[in-house]
Image (tube, helix red, strand yellow):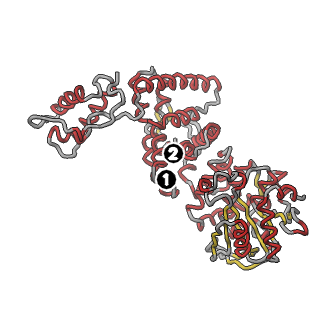
Amino acid sequence: MNFAETLHTNPIFEVIARRAAALDVRAFVIGGFVRDLVLKRPSKDIDIVCIGSGIDLAESVGRTLNVPVIVFKNFGTAMLRTGGSEPEEAPETTDPADRWEVEFVGARKESYRSESRKPIVEDGTLEDDQNRRDFTINAMGISLNESDFGQLLDPFGGLDDLRRKIIRTPLDPTITFSDDPLRMMRAIRFASQLGFDIEPDTFDAIVAMKDRIAIVSRERITDELNKIILSPRPSYGFKLLFHAGLLDLIFPELVALKGVETIEGKGHKDNFYHTLQVLDNVADRSDDLWLRWAALLHDIAKPATKRFDPRVGWTFHGHEDLGAKQVPGIFRQMKLPLNEKMRFVKKLVRLHLRPIALVKEQITDSALRRLLIEAGEDLEALMTLCRADITSKNYDRVKKHLTNFDKVERKLRELDERDKLRNFQPVITGELIMEAFGLKPSKEVGQIKTAVREAILEGTVANTLEAAVPYMLEEGRKFGLEPVKELTINPELVNEKPSPSGNIP
């Protein structure tokens, strides 16, 4: 197969070819770019292998294109970006199609020690370089040399494996995975992203070598896990991880969801497969990684809260609150960010039953108001998760629940438009309560603040100083507290942004 015509449409390849010829080195585009070219998938990352110094070739190309080159001497690689080092830095006249990230390396062969996935690297031939590739579909190369420009070099049948939709290692898979155990995660990631099967001997080798994953850093494992979560059908990747035995090693909390227990003829759904279905349902609706993480963790505390009640069967009371408490620990263990992304997932795990509860009972403005305020700007994401959480095999039951969700969402929109509650804050703050009664931070301050907030949410007290201060004083007297003499309200202690209307009907 010849790709000369395709490569000629991108000037970068002709520049590389000319500079390689000038340096008297042979150059090839190899790996993922070739795979994606065959699959007609978009790709902006180009890997160039040359028989010689990859750094020298990169610097020569960089001078020709007048772009900076980043050199990694310890690794013998160099990289440049065309069209600006970052997309936003590219000139306005630069066509996005001209923006590429190109990495150069000299052909090499690798050997490994059992305790590390970092190879000992030596100069090698193109054959050596293709031998060290993880999978046949990533070992294909295309020549950039004048004598055979555009010619496909496919020593392991990667093109045929792409057509058959197979993930397979070029060499003995037990050696491939023992040398670099991260390749086990990558095999499953590619299968999940592309919808491919893993060739039986290759999968058996993953099962046999799974314990080698212990030498891989958590960051690299999580990076692959995130790519599986972002794949079109993430449940496929997780099922492969489970059946290979890897999931129990890298995410035992998820495996703990698996299984069904039956007592007195009463069972419950398998929460592992339910969770994967919810994840797929969210994937059908959103590409957001953190919303997908919320789907993955929404029932994570069910094993710890599972109880059998002879009257009603199996219960999981409080799993949403306990699950929310587990989120920071899981994020810390996975080396995921402990910032607003984690707090977003924690919030959705904690609130994921609330809209469902509203569907099951008579909807009151008070209940809707509380949900609207607690969800805030994440309400749409929460409702997406809740819709995804309806996984009954009974189509009529699912349809009924989704119709009720439509009613809940309509009422929430109406309430939000009327009361502007997304950024609601009570006008009474804890600091104001402490000044009013001469208190230091204490349990009483929190209880008074909560009482005022609840009264405002119930609509019995307006969210204004005139209405809320007398109620605050009344609540204080229940604790035997009296306000300081000649109480005045320090405006600096008043919440500057109560509900925009200043009042909740």
Query: Type of residue at label 2?
Result: Ile
Residue 436 locus on image (x, y percent): 16, 38
**Looking at the image, is mark 1 or mark 2 nearer the viewer?**
1
- For residue 144, which quarter of the picture? bottom right
Residue of label 2: 300
Residue 14 locus on image (x, y percent): 81, 63
Q: CA distance from mark 1 to mark 2?
A: 10 Å
The furthest residue to the bottom: 122
- For residue 263, which quarter of the picture? top right
Whether residue 52 is situated above or below residue 473 in the rendered picture: below
Residue 486 appears left or right of 207: left
Whether residue 462 is situated above or below residue 272 in the rendered picture: above
Q: Nearer the viewer, residue 195 or 378?
A: 378
The furthest residue to the front: 93
Give whichever of discs 1 and 2 has the lower sequence position.
2
How packed is label 1: few (under 14 Cα within 10 Å), some, or many (20 or more)? some
